[in-house]
Amino acid sequence: MGGNHAHGTHAHGGAARASRSVRIAVLAVIVPVAVATLAAVLWMWPDKPEAPAGGGSALTKVTGTIVGIDLEPCPEQVQAAPPGEPASDAPRTDPRRCGTARVELTSGADSGQIVRTELPSGPGTSVFTPGQKVVLLHTPDAAEATEESGAPEVSPYQLSDHDRSTPLWLVGAAFALAVVAFGRLRGLTALLGLAVTFVLLLQFLIPAILAGRPPLLAAVVCAAAIMLTVLYLTHGFTMATSIAVIGTIASLTLTGVLATVSINLTHLSGITDEASLNLDLSHSVNSQGLLLASIIIGALGVLDDVTVTQAATVTELARANPAYRFAQLYRAAARIGRAHIASVINTVILAYAGASLPLLLLLSIGRQPLGDVLTGPALATEIVRSAAGTLGLIAAVPITTALAALLRSRGSAADEAGEDAPPSGEDDDHRHAPPVSTPAGGRYRTSRPPATELPPPSWPDRSADPFR
């Protein structure tokens, strides 16, 4: 009896020491990363932009409501000839609506007044009707400029776009109510995390890049700040959340390395459209760094989903099967992770394809060979973006699963519950075998056949949060 007791106590002490060592190792990674991220955010936080110099009046936006529209014939234009055919001088009537709109201003210095402005009739312009709320551009110097030049009088107000503030507020309110109604407290914390993400993106990342900070460094710091804040705010300060954070850090680092290597191998400049060209020429933004930054920020949104799911999966498996060792937890959770990855990869590719759909249409119209299309800078950029993000996503499953299984394996679970861990030399089936019954025939039978490994995981009906 004494020997058995001593052996059990020794095993429990070893399990406790192993559990504490894992927790200390986790904190040894999380705390320095959090401190370094906070210091980097404070150091890189951009100053407020200076007010534009000069005493001239700036272009401002005001809102109003259309009270009436006066239509008139559109000016005749020359019909453009199709490619390969001679030009035609036959005039045509512009199919778009032309005329003027009477708008009652609801903001600005002239609020309450009714102004008249021309209806926009260029390609892709919106259709305006009476009663709609609109946005107008106000140029106070327009009247003075026309008087000095002798040109016909031009209204200082011009129709710009529809006022979408009210519909967007309604859509946002419906979204928030649905999240809170289903997620309750967890949904509320998720909304707070979303607000933090928007603040860091709009108030830190974008101004920092425009202020001349290296785009890659700014993206790494912003991604770390979003990850630490949102994951802990949403899932609580638990070891499972810390494992998800470490898995995300490792996978995001791998994604950045793969993206850097891929961009260098394919000689991508990062300039694929007028917006990136304008940023490179007018604001001296490093286009390659901006491409890397976009890959990192885009990958973060999918990586934290995978790492949190794997950490929660391992936690539930360990709770349902306390006798599972590291290898058994890892194999069971990895099977779930592979199914998750198989569907998420398709989601990532479709997301990038949807964002690049106009580009794909233009390339299809050009009737270029498929090889030229795939190796062109525009589509090659999307291929590199998708491949780097997907490889990081695949790596997130084994990394996070291994870390979570190490934390939640039998020794750690026993230490967390305050119970003695079973002796390490005993066989699992004997340890968890049901009582042996002796029927009248004198032959011994067990209530289940012998097994060579632990039974498959059981999923009890419990409402416990896997992150608690």
Image (tube, rainbow, N blue to C red):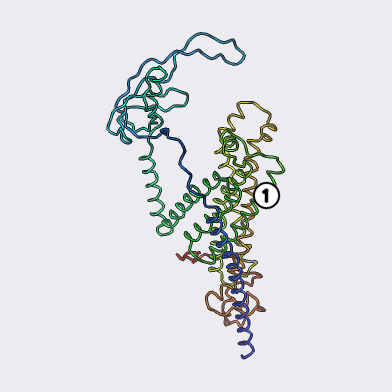
Quarter holding residue 404:
bottom right
User: 323 or 303: nearer the eye?
Assistant: 303
Quadrant (top left, top right, bottom left, bottom right) of the N terminus = bottom right
**Numbered disc 1: secondary structure:** helix
Quarter holding residue 377:
top right
**Residue holding disc 1:** 258
The number of numbered discs placed on residues in the rendered structure image is 1
Residue 416 in percent (x, y) is at: 54, 74
User: 454 or 230: nearer the eye?
Assistant: 230
Residue shown at the point (59%, 49%) measured from the top left? 296
Identified by mark 1, the residue type is Leu
> Farthest residue in the left direction?
112
- At label 1, counting other C-alpha atoms closer than 10 Å, the crowd grade (few under 14, some 14-19, many 20 or more) is some
> Farthest residue in the bottom direction?
2
Residue shown at the point (32%, 36%) measured from the top left? 107
Residue 269 in percent (x, y) is at: 66, 39
Quarter holding residue 372:
top right
Residue shown at the point (61%, 77%) measured from the top left? 17
